[in-house]
Image (tube, helix red, strand yellow):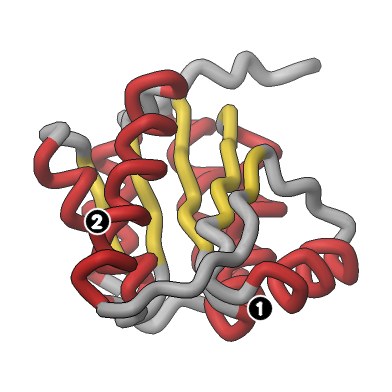
Amino acid sequence: MELKKEKKILFIVGTRPEAIKICPLVREASTFFDTFVLGTGQHYESVLEVFSLFGISINKIFPAKKFKTTGLQLAYYQQIISQSIESYNPELIVVHGDTTSCFAGALSAYLYKKMWFTLKQVCVHKIYIVLILKKCIENGLTLLQSIVMLLQL
């Protein structure tokens, strides 16, 4: 039986450490949800390498750029993330970490009134994600309910 993937999740990745930590979640989430991975280009080459090692495609990745100030970097990331939110229209946005890319992702989600969370908020292990997503599908829980369960772990 093929699952209908109605809910959309946008994963925002900027750096290599974020990619390493978020790849298992992207892999599992893509089984149950329509996922979109956005790379900001903050660590362009190493993010591509990590996703390649996991066998996961990045839907959209922007080239690396140099910025004179963090403010310019943040403005650029928020602009490209906002464009992706407008075109993809996800129900949930997931970021990991405390980098400029993550901050821009969280800020954009807030401004677009989208549900979001950062994996830095909770200790997420792959087994918890699998169990929660399975329970969500099996019991007909909403995406919001499954995220609440995740945050309570």
Q: Is residue 112 left or right of residue 79?
A: left
Q: Position of residue 20 (x, y in %)?
A: 66, 78
Could you tell me how far apart the alpha carbons at marks 2 and 1 are, in whole angstroms?
25 Å
Name the quadrant containing residue 94: bottom left
The residue beneath circle 2 is: 75
> How crowded is the residue under tag 1: few (<14 C-alpha within 10 Å), some, or many (20+)?
some
Please state which amino acid type lies under the numbered disc 2: Ala
Mark 2 vs mark 1: give the one in front.
Answer: 2
Q: Position of residue 110 (x, y in %)?
A: 12, 46
Look at the numbered disc 1 and give the secondary structure of its residue. Answer: helix
Residue at image position (25%, 50%) is 116
Q: Is residue 5 above or below residue 125?
A: above
> How crowded is the residue under tag 2: few (<14 C-alpha within 10 Å), some, or many (20+)?
few
Q: Position of residue 71 (x, y in %)?
A: 20, 70
Tell me if I can see residue 21 in this picture.
no
Q: Is residue 104 above or below residue 125?
A: above
Q: Which mark is residue 20?
A: 1
Tell me if I can see residue 62 in this picture.
yes
